[in-house]
């Protein structure tokens, strides 16, 4: 065979091999092969890049040493069926790991594909919450209306009796009944607000101005608990929103932060409310952070559940964040929470710039000046 023929044959063999390797390296999922002991014997570039290494530096490393988890491996070179796909949480991210026996050799080998499904899990969780809120809303609405009618009668007749009686002790007892009835009525009103499905009445509003006015509503209570409020309001455009509903969302989150901080700190509590414009994502980002105790990891997925609360009896109904979540869903916004136990919690709301058939425009308002005070 001549030299030219050898070069041609080598090119015919090597070109498809190079293309195959290039294709594997172009895939963002982690694709790698392990032996029967779990040692990486080949990998694509994505896995190596995750550790800031070249693929050659990853080969020879045990997978358990990389991620601190074990993977299923083929026990025999004759294994034919794919191994069970598993989900693993590694750090703050979730991966779906599929494993397949590799045929064609005398030693067992296993091909693994690791797909990052963290965002998929977040979307699935949001859909689950939306479905649960919709079903529960129908039930709550009917129950709240049934309770509201006799409750109104209790309040009315109690007030009439207070006016008629001249005995101070009886009047005091009636006052306690009236106070409890009004508390029940506020709970019923919260239930109705939670179940109400009304179309948002959107107008062009300054999110910064809404935040300033909302913080002012809680200024007395925040001061009473010695909680400092920092308003870091950036230059953001006005957007089409229902001002009343967004005020309720922010107020509920601030109240939640206030109660968390007040219950864990004394004298150095702090809540930071900030806004910024993310042009690339096409959103105004509203962030409410606190330096409270944070949210334990095991209840993070439940904080938007109706009636779920970690507060003592009488301190909350567990509806505030659920109502906020429902409003955010109705508007087509997004909301998420980030928290590390012991260092506080951060709620992040994304408000699309283009809503309601109109485009957000920059309208200077007094919020920036007020925020400085």
Image: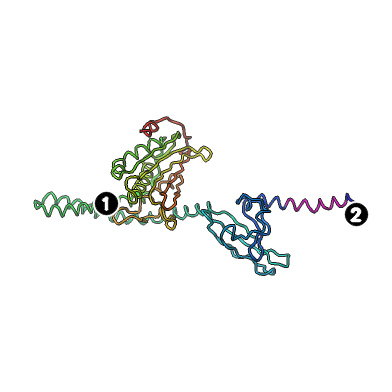
**Residue 347 point in image, percent of width and height:** 43, 46
Residue at 46%, 43% (x, y): give it.
350
Q: Nearer the viewer, residue 60 or 373?
A: 60
Q: Which residue is mark 1?
A: 185
Estimate how packed mark 2 is, as few (under 14), some (14 to 19) or many (20 or more) residues with alpha carbons within 10 Å. Answer: few
The front one of 123 and 201 is 123
Lower position in the chain sequence, tag 2 or tag 1: 2
Circle 2: element type: loop
Q: Nearer the viewer, residue 161 or 107?
A: 107
Residue at 88% x, 49% y: name it: 4
Q: Quadrant of residue 275?
A: top left
Above or below — where is 308 with respect to 238? below
Residue 17 is left or right of residue 368, and the answer is right
Whether residue 190 sits left or right of residue 56 in the image: it is: left
Placement of the N terminus among the 4 image quadrants: bottom right
Q: Secondary structure at mark 1?
A: helix
- Quarter-of-image position of residue 76: bottom right
Q: Nearer the viewer, mark 2 or mark 1?
A: 2
What residue is disc 2 on? Answer: 1
- Residue 230: x percent and y percent? 38, 39
Q: Is residue 18 left or right of residue 69?
A: right
Could you tell me if the residues under marks 2 and 1 are in contact, i.e. CB atoms within 8 Å? no
- Residue 27 makes an appearance in the image: no
Classified by dominant secondary structure, the portion drawn in magenta counts as: helix
Q: Which residues are magenta?
A: 5-19
Does the stretch in magenta take in 11?
yes
């Amino acid at each position: 065979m001549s030299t030219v023929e050898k070069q041609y044959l080598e090119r015919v063999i090597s070109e498809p091999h190079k293309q195959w390797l290039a294709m594997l390296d172009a895939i963002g999922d982690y694709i790698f092969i392990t032996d029967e002991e779990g040692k990486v014997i080949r990998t694509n570039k994505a896995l190596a890049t995750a550790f800031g290494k070249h693929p050659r530096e990853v080969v020879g490393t045990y997978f358990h040493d990389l991620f601190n988890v074990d993977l299923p491996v083929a026990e025999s070179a004759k294994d034919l069926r794919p191994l069970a796909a598993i989900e693993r949480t590694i750090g703050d991210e979730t991966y779906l790991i599929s494993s397949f026996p590799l045929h064609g050799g005398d030693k067992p080998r296993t091909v693994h594909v690791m797909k990052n499904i963290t965002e998929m899990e977040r979307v699935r969780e949001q859909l689950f919450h939306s479905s649960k809120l919709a079903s529960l809303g129908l039930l709550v609405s009917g129950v709240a209306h049934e309770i509201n009618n006799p409750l109104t009668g209790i309040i009315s007749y109690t007030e009439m009796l207070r006016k008629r009686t001249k005995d101070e002790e009886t009047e005091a007892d009636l006052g306690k009944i009236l106070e409890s009835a009004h508390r029940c009525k506020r709970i019923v009103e919260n239930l109705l607000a939670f179940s109400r499905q009304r179309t948002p009445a959107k107008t062009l509003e300054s999110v910064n101005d809404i935040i300033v006015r909302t913080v002012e509503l809680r200024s007395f209570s925040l001061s009473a608990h010695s909680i400092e409020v920092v308003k870091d309001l950036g230059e953001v455009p006005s957007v089409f929103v229902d001002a009343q509903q967004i005020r309720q969302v922010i107020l509920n989150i601030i109240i939640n932060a206030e109660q968390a901080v007040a219950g864990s700190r004394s004298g150095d509590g702090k809540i930071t409310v900030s806004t910024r414009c993310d042009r690339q994502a096409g959103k105004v980002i509203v962030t409410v952070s606190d330096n409270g105790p944070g949210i334990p990891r095991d209840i993070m997925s439940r904080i938007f559940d109706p009636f779920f609360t970690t507060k003592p009896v009488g301190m909350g109904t567990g509806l505030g964040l659920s109502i906020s979540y429902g409003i955010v869903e109705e508007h087509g916004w997004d909301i998420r929470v980030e928290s590390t136990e012991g260092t506080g919690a951060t709620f992040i709301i994304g408000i699309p710039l283009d809503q309601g058939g109109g485009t957000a425009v920059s309208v200077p308002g007094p919020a920036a000046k007020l925020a400085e005070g």
